[in-house]
Amino acid sequence: MQLSLQSSALLNNGVEIPRLGVGVYQTPPGELTLHAVKYALKIGYRHIDTASLYGNEGDVGRAILESGIEREEIFITTKVWNSDQGYQSTLAACKRSLQRLGLPYVDLYLIHWPVEGQNKGTWRAMVPYH
């Protein structure tokens, strides 16, 4: 299979996820992240991967807003960190991520790293219909 920036995979829930994306792990908060994400979107990337731990969700959100690209055309992934796991903590962490991103939703919310004893609560918070 030949990949392009338009290549996607169909998830079990019917959502399409771009196969290629830009991750901002170890990209420092501020102008560098802002410009990197804006440039990635400009050249055709439509999947941006961040996490609360990275400290740059706000810059990712600002880049999306400033890109002029419709939100629905961009696939956003972020993650809940270890210290935020558990049912109520995960819900609160997701809300904080959305606020930092300035977005009403993310397309994929992942468990950054499973924490023993918190897995069930964290998972339950992440599954909309349980």
Image (spheres, rainbow, N blue to C red):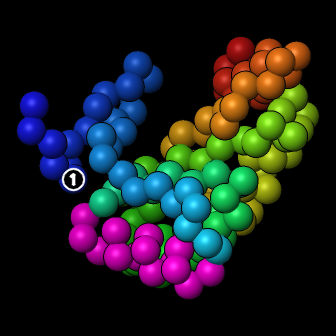
Q: Residue placed at 64% from the left, 67% from the top?
A: 56
Q: Position of residue 95 (x, y in %)?
A: 78, 51
| Range covered by the magenta-colored residues | 30-44
Q: Quadrant of the N terminus?
A: top left
The residue lying toward the viewer, choosing from 4 and 87, is 4
Residue 60 lies in quadrant: bottom right
Q: In the rendered view, tell whether residue 20 sits above or below residue 122.
A: below
Decide if residue 111 is on the left or right side of residue 85: left
Decide if residue 128 is on the left or right side of residue 85: left
Q: Residue placed at 39% from the left, 66% from the top?
A: 70
Q: Position of residue 71 (x, y in %)?
A: 45, 61
Residue at the limit of the structure toward the bottom, as seen here: 31
State whether residue 105 appears in this view.
Answer: no
Specify the principal SS of the magenta part.
helix
Q: Is residue 36 magenta?
A: yes
Decide if residue 77 is on the left or right side of residue 83: left
Q: Position of residue 83 (x, y in %)?
A: 87, 40
Where is mark 1, residue-wise? 5
Residue 85 lies in quadrant: top right
Q: Position of residue 108 (x, y in %)?
A: 54, 40
Q: Is residue 15 magenta?
A: no
State whether residue 67 appears in this view.
Answer: yes
Residue at the limit of the structure toward the left, as seen here: 2
Q: In the rendered view, tell whether residue 72 sits above or below residue 126.
A: below
Q: Amino acid at mark 1?
A: Leu
